[in-house]
Image (cartoon, grey):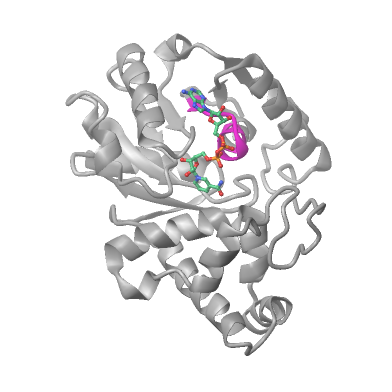
C-alpha cells in the first residue's frame, strides 16, 4: 500500500536507517540523509541484508524487497522541502542536532513535524533550537534497537508540543507497526529508568560475587523471561553507553542511579564490549560481538 505523506530521516546510522526501513515497509516514500554518500551506501547495504534475511519482512505484512525502492538518499537537507514528517537520528550531541534543526527549520514547510530519536537530551532543550513557530511541531519519538524488531516507541512532548503533534506522531508509529506510549520529558524517559535499575543491581551482584555475569544473564532469560540478560545487553550496546546513561540519571535522580564502581573501572580500562572490544562476556580482546 502506497501512503501519501512524505517521510524524512536524518542520520543513516544504526537507528536512522532502520527507522527509514520501517516507514518504507509500511508503504511510505522515505528520504534518508547522512553526511556522505559512503555512509548512505553502507546504510542501504545493511538494510538490504535485513530485508534479504526476512527479519523485517516476517513482521510487516506490507514488507517486501521493494521497500528499499521507496528509500531515496541525499546528503543535502535542502531536499527535505516537501517532507511531512522528519525524524532526526544523528549523533547524540546537542550541537550536532541543533545544526540539523536549524537547516531543517529553514527548508521544511511550516506544517512539517520534526521528531527526534534522542535517548538522553531533554526534548524541551532540543526544541529550543527550532524557531518559535516550529516548536509546536517538535516531538520526541524514542525507538529501540533493533528498530526493525522492537515494537515500542516512547513519544515525548516538549513544553510547547501541540496535542495534535503528539496524535500525529502516535498515528505514524502505529502505521509502521509500533506501539507508541506517551512519556513525560524526564531524563531516561521510562524505559531507561527501568532498565538501569536492573543493570545497576546486576553489576552489584557481580561485585558481591553472588553470581557470574553468565549466570545472571541466564537468570534474567530463564527466570524472568527477558530475551537477553543485562550483561549480554551491555556487551551489545557497550558498557560506556550504559555508564553515560547512568551518569545522566544519577545527576537527575541521585543515589538510586549511581553507577557501580566496577562498571566505571571496566569502562576506564577499556572493557566496554561492542564490536571488537572485550566486554563482560566477550573476554577475548579480538572478539567481535556484533
Ligand atoms: N543506538 C541505540 O541503541 C539508540 C537507541 C535509542 C535512541 N538512540 C539515539 O538515536 C540517535 C542516533 O543513534 P545511532 O546509534 O543510530 O548513532 P550512529 O552513530 O549509528 O548514527 C548517527 C548517524 O548520524 C550521521 N550524522 C551525524 N551528523 C549528521 C549531520 N549533520 N547530518 C546528517 N547525518 C549526520 C552520522 O554520519 C551517522 O551515520 C542518537 O540520538 C541516539 O541517542 C540510539
Which image quarter: residue 189? bottom left
Q: Is residue 116 visible?
A: yes
**Observer-nearest residue: 42 or 111?**
42
The tally of labels here is 0
Q: Which residue is at a point 73% across and 58% down the rendered structure image?
A: 278
The reply, left or right, for residue 276 in relation to residue 26 is right
Q: Is residue 188 visible?
A: no
The reply, left or right, for residue 34 in relation to residue 109 is right
Q: On the rendered image, what quadrant is the N terminus found in? A: top right
The reply, left or right, for residue 134 in relation to residue 155 is left
User: Whole-percent x and y of residue 52?
Assistant: 82, 36
Q: Is residue 5 magenta?
A: no
Establish if 169 lies above or below 250. Answer: above
Magenta-drawn segment: 8-20
**Observer-nearest residue: 36 or 1?**
36
User: Whole-percent x and y of residue 58?
Assistant: 74, 47
User: Whole-percent x and y of residue 285?
Assistant: 78, 55
Outermost residue on the bottom side: it is 210
Establish if 69 lies above or below 182. Answer: above
Which image quarter: residue 94? top left
Q: Is residue 16 magenta?
A: yes
User: Whole-percent x and y of residue 149?
Assistant: 65, 51
Q: Which residue is at a point 56% across and 76% down the rendered structure image?
A: 203
Q: Which residue is at a point 70% across and 81% down the rendered structure image?
A: 212
**Observer-nearest residue: 243 or 33?**
243
Outermost residue on the front side: it is 269
The reply, left or right, for residue 236 in relation to residue 203 is right
Amino acid at each position: 500500500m502506497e501512503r501519501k505523506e512524505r517521510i524524512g530521516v536524518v542520520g543513516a546510522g544504526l537507528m536512522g536507517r532502520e527507522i527509514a526501513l520501517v516507514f518504507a515497509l509500511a508503504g511510505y516514500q522515505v528520504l534518508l540523509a547522512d553526511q556522505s554518500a559512503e555512509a548512505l551506501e553502507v546504510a542501504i547495504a545493511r538494510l538490504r541484508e535485513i530485508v534479504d534475511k526476512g527479519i523485517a519482512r516476517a513482521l510487516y505484512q506490507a514488507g517486501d524487497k521493494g521497500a528499499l525502492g521507496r528509500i531515496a538518499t541525499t546528503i543535502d537537507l535542502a531536499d527535505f522541502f516537501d517532507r511531512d514528517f522528519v525524524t532526526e537520528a544523528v549523533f547524540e550531541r546537542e550541537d550536532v542536532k541543533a545544526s540539523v534543526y536549524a537547516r531543517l527549520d529553514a527548508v521544511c514547510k511550516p506544517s512539517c513535524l520534526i521528531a527526534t530519536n534522542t535517548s538522553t537530551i531533554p526534548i524541551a532543550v532540543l526544541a529550543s533550537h527550532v524557531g518559535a513557530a516550529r516548536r509546536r511541531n517538535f516531538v520526541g519519538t524514542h525507538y529501540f534497537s533493533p528498530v526493525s524488531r522492537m515494537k515500542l516507541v516512547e513519544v515525548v512532548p516538549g513544553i510547547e508540543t501541540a496535542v495534535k503533534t503528539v496524535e500525529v506522531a502516535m498515528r505514524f508509529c502505529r502505521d509502521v507497526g509500533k506501539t507508541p506510549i506517551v512519556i513525560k520529558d524526564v531524563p531516561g524517559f521510562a524505559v531507561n529508568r527501568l532498565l538501569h535499575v536492573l543493570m545497576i543491581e546486576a553489576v552489584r551482584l557481580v561485585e558481591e560475587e553472588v553470581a557470574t555475569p553468565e549466570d545472571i544473564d541466564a537468570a534474567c532469560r530463564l527466570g524472568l523471561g527477558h530475551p537477553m540478560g543485562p550483561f549480554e545487553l551491555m556487551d551489545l550496546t557497550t558498557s560506556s553507553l550504559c555508564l553515560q546513561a547512568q551518569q545522566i540519571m544519577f545527576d537527575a535522580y541521585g543515589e538510586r542511579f549511581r553507577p557501580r564502581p566496577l562498571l566505571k573501572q571496566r569502562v576506564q580500562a577499556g572493557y566496554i564490549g561492542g564490536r571488537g572490544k572485550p566486554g563482560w562476556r566477550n573476554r577475548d580482546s579480538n572478539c567481535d560481538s556484533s
